[in-house]
Image: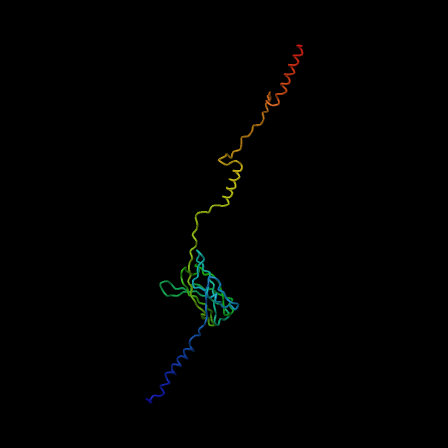
């Protein structure tokens, strides 16, 4: 039992050396974080996402009704970011296979190495996105050697919203109806209700300009009667 006393510490030492070697060669994990919203996510004065912002975050982004346009708002926490362009890359998978491809990337050229970033842009169907599909999202930068460095990652699903159906029946013109009602009231006040004619009364012909005698049955007959009475009185005097 005492012939191999040195073997009792060899295995623990070997295990410790393997673990230490793995820690030295393994890349450092970047503790980044990314959240998505249909509206800008609430942050505090320092740019960190608030409790309300986290509650509003979602992985399902709805399109503009009837259009293949998805407004997207991104909040990200960047671990050890460096001044220089920051990219938000979107990756899809070819249907029927697991082959991954980059659909599109957004460049934030004014990134200055800050810890928190809030970005807003649109994803469009004509630049590589498809309705009702899911995409992997990576926030990346290029390191000094030109290698893509992943700072944070997430996933979103693009939901297509149908537009409202077009109404073929044109609505009645309320202003025209109001004008007709007002005209009907005026016609009623003018005694034109009940099927009255809209025609004007016949024109009165002008007085005749022909020469000749005319008898006026009115006051014009009085002088003739007086003349007859005077003639009768003269005859009576002569007989006397």
The quarter of the displayed image where residue 156 is located: bottom left
Q: Which residue lies furthest to the top in this view?
A: 239
Q: Which residue lies furthest to the front in this view?
A: 240
Q: Quick one: 46 or 101, which is closer to the camera?
A: 46
The quarter of the displayed image where residue 21 is located: bottom left
Question: In this figure, which colouring scheme has been used for the structure?
Answer: rainbow
Q: Residue furthest left?
A: 1
Q: Quick one: 110 or 52, which is closer to the camera?
A: 52
Q: Is residue 225 left or right of residue 179?
A: right
Q: Quick one: 61 or 21, which is closer to the camera?
A: 61
Q: Is residue 137 above or below residue 186?
A: below
Numbered-mark total: 0
The C terminus appears in which quarter of the rendering? top right
The N terminus appears in which quarter of the rendering? bottom left
Q: Which residue lies furthest to the bottom in this view?
A: 2
Q: In this view, does 47 lie above or below 9?
A: above
Q: Where is residue 145 in the image (x, y as percent from the top left)?
A: 46, 72
Q: Position of residue 62 (x, y in %)?
A: 44, 60
Q: Where is residue 22 in the image (x, y as percent from the top left)?
A: 41, 78
């Amino acid at each position: 039992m005492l012939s191999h006393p040195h073997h009792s510490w060899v295995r623990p030492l070997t295990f410790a050396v393997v673990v230490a070697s793995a820690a030295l060669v393994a890349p450092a994990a970047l503790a980044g974080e990314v959240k998505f919203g249909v509206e800008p996510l609430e942050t505090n004065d320092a740019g960190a996402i608030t409790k309300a912002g986290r509650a509003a975050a979602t992985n399902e982004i709805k399109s503009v009704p009837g259009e293949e346009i998805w407004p997207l708002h991104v909040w990200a926490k960047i671990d050890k970011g460096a001044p220089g362009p920051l990219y938000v890359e979107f990756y899809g998978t070819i249907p029927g296979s697991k082959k991954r491809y980059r659909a599109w990337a957004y460049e934030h050229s004014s990134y200055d190495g800050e810890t928190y970033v809030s970005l807003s842009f649109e994803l469009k169907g004509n630049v590589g996105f498809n309705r009702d599909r899911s995409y992997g999202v990576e926030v990346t930068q290029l390191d000094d050697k030109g290698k893509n460095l992943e700072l944070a990652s997430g996933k979103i699903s693009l939901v297509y919203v149908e537009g409202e159906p077009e109404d073929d029946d044109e609505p009645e013109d309320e202003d025209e109806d109001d004008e007709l009602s007002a005209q009907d009231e005026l016609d009623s006040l003018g005694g034109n209700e009940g099927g009255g004619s809209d025609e004007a009364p016949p024109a009165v012909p002008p007085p005749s300009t022909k020469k000749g005698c005319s008898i006026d049955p009115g006051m014009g007959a009085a002088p003739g009667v007086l003349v007859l009475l005077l003639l009768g009185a003269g005859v009576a005097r002569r007989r006397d």
